[in-house]
Structures are given as structure tokens and as C-alpha cells.
Amino acid sequence: ELKVEQNPLFLSMQEGKNYTIYCNYSTTSDRLYWYRQDPGKSLESLFVLLSNGAVKQEGRLMASLDTKARLSTLHITAAVHDLSATYFCAVLTGTASKLTFGTGTRLQVTL
Amino acid sequence: DAGVIQSPRHEVTEMGQEVTLRCKPISGHDYLFWYRQTMMRGLELLIYFNNNVPIDDSGMPEDRFSAKMPNASFSTLKIQPSEPRDSAVYFCASSLTSTAPGELFFGEGSRLTVL
């Protein structure tokens, strides 16, 4: 059974600081997604990482993928309050579009 | 594009009652997913359809749960009878595998409370 684990589960950080969220998964996959969920809202796709070594950046967020280590990271640079949300990684398995989500990391950026 | 539309947004019901959640996927998408989100268990995939055909329902917790997709623009998730432990947010999502497999577009969710 595929397991997708994130750490930390909860992260409180001050504005302007940098931090990294980690996503480990237990089976081979060449496609990994990061999603964002604001409190009480739906999930929104942020990044898709398609191959080993892939790196995507948008604004203060940068995601990377190491398929050999089965690890993805989401790096936050100079955090701002608007980044406060829960971030999920999700791994695609099989030939279908079946995504298995990680546990989520709740990020709180304080002023 | 209206996105994935779910109804109702909120439902409060009593134990034993039947609950029906509805979903309209994005037009043209070929996959439809039902997820359940709780604090304890996170996001769980319940069932998904490809071109209206159920592909994998291994996540459906019990026989009390059933899902249908009678056509490409409509799906239902039914719980009968409902129990307090079914209280959760139920998300419907759709995707277009030919261009972006795994990139799911989620609805706003249906928050279910079973008393």
C-alpha cells in the first residue's frame, strides 16, 4: 500500500523566514503534485513535478522532486502571511489518475 | 468555465437518514473522483470513475456508501443509513487525463454533519 508522509504536520513561522516541507512516498512514481488548501476551502493545484530532478517555482514557493530518494520538497522563501494554508503533496500511481495524498502540512505565517 | 460544482454545500442530518451528495464535473473531463476529508484520516479517495464507469471503489468504507455516474455531467454519492462517523467534508474532483493526469480540479466540498 502506498504511503505518503509529510513533515512537519504543523509549521508556524514568522514572516520573512525560510523553511522546507518534506514529502516522502513509499513506491515508485514519476509524477508528484503539490496542492494548497485554505481553511474551509477547496484544494488548488500548485505544481506538478514530472521527472527526477524537476524543479518548479512560483513566487515564494519552490518544489523539487528526487524520484530515487522518493522525496519531494516544498521550499518557502521569505514567507508572507498570505501563504498561510495547508499544503498537500500527492503521488500519482498506476496508469489511471489515482492520486494518493499526504497527511498535509498546516503552515501558519505570523506577522 | 464554472469549475466542479457540488451540492449541497452543507448538510445536517440525523443518524439513520439517507444523504445524497451531488457533483457536476468540468465539461470534457474524463475522470471523476470522490474524496472524504476528516481531521483524523485526512484526504481519502472513496471511488473514481473513468468515462462514467466506476474503476476503483476500494476506498468506499461500507456498503452504506454507494456512488453513481449516470452520465458525463453528473455523479452522486449516497450514504444510507448515515451515521455520526460519516461526518466529514466530501469533495468531488475531475481531471482530464490526456493533458494532465493527476491534476485534479476540486469542487468546494459538501460538509456533512450527522447528529
Image: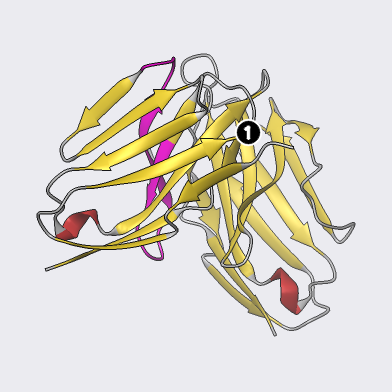
Quadrant in which residue B87 is drawn: bottom right
Chain of the residue that carries numbered disc 1 in the rendered image: A
Q: Position of residue B62 (x, y in %)?
A: 86, 58
Vertically, is A52 above or below B43?
above
| Residue positioned most to the front | A69
What quarter of the picture does the C terminus of chain B occupy? bottom right
The amino acid at mark 1 is: Ser
| Residue B34 placement (x, y as % from top left) | 64, 47
User: Dividing the picture into quarters, in which one does residue B111 lie?
Assistant: bottom right
Picture quadrant of residue A28: top right
Badge 1 marks a residue whose secondary structure is: loop
Looking at the image, residue B78 sits to the left or right of residue A46; the answer is right
* Residue placed under numbered mark 1 in the picture: A26
The residue that appears at 12% across and 59% down in the rendered structure is A15
Quadrant that contains the N terminus of chain B: top left
Q: Position of residue B31 (x, y in %)?
A: 62, 29
> From this viewpoint, is residue B25 visible?
no
Say which of A71 and B107 sits in front.
A71
Q: Residues within 10 Å of mark 1 (few under 14, many from 20)?
A: some
Q: Residue at x 53, y 52 (%)?
A: A103
Does the magenta-highlighted stretch encompass residue A50? yes
Q: Specify whether residue A109 is in view.
A: yes
Q: How many marks?
A: 1
From the viewer's side, name the closer residue of A36 and B54: A36
Residue at the farthest right position: B63
Image-based side of B115 in relation to A90, left or right: right
Give the extent of the magenta segment: A34-53
Residue drawn 55% across and 32% down?
Answer: A91
